Amino acid sequence: MPLGSTVSLRHFKAELVKISKRKVQLPGYALSLIDPRLQRSLDPRKPAPTGRTPLKSYLVHFYRTDRLSALPPVSQVPTLEELGDDL
């Protein structure tokens, strides 16, 4: 599900970070804010990325808390680009 806001991207990310750190984020749902440069590199020998991740690159993963056992690993969650026209 695409997500948007009228505030600047920087402020939007800050609000998502605040929500993601709450003990109870959203009733029945949770979210994770994922830096794709860190999440997609599963090779421990690969050096850590340098610099900052562009704000537009972060992944926001919303999921239902009543179905955690069926939740795929974050590394398998498709990005919007990967979904393409399937939205």
Image: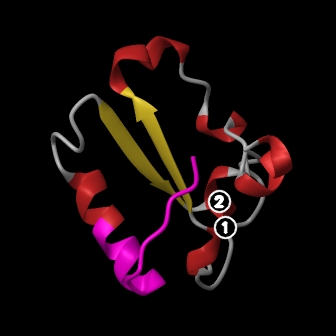
> Which callout, 2 or 1, points at the residue further toward the start of the chain?
2
- Residue 72: name its quadrant: top right
Q: Position of residue 26 (x, y in %)?
A: 24, 41
Residue 72 included in the magenta stretch of the image:
no
Task: Give the image location of residue 33, x and y in percent.
Answer: 45, 56
Task: Look at the image and name its color scheme.
Answer: secondary structure
Residue 43 as seen in the image, left or right of residue 12: right
Residue 36 placement (x, y as % from top left): 65, 59
Instruction: Measuring from the top left, give residue 42's x and y in whole percent.
Output: 73, 45
Q: Judging from the image, what secondary structure is the residue with disc 1 in?
A: loop
Q: Is residue 37 left or right of residue 10?
A: right
Up the image or down, 17 lies above or below 56; here it is above
Residue tagged by mark 1? Answer: 48
Q: Amino acid at mark 2?
A: Pro
- Residue count near mark 2 (Cα–Cα under 10 Å), binned few <14, some 14–19, many ≥20: some
Residue at 42 percent across and 72 percent down: it is 5
Per the rendering, the mark at residue 83 is none
Q: Are marks 2 and 1 in contact (CB under 8 Å)?
A: no
The numbered dot on residue 36 is 2
The residues tagged by marks 2 and 1 sit, at their Cα atoms, a distance apart of 12 Å
Callout 1 crowding tier (Cα within 10 Å): few <14, some 14–19, many ≥20: few
Residue at the extreme left? 23
Tell me the quarter of the image containing the C terminus.
top right
Residue that appears at 56% across and 78% down:
55
Which amino acid type is shown beneath numbered disc 1? Ala
Tell us which disc is closer to us: 2 or 1: 2
Along the line of sight, the residue nearer the viewer: 18 or 4: 4
Query: Is 83 situated above or below 53?
Result: above
- For the record, the magenta segment spans 1-15
Q: Secondary structure at mark 2?
A: helix
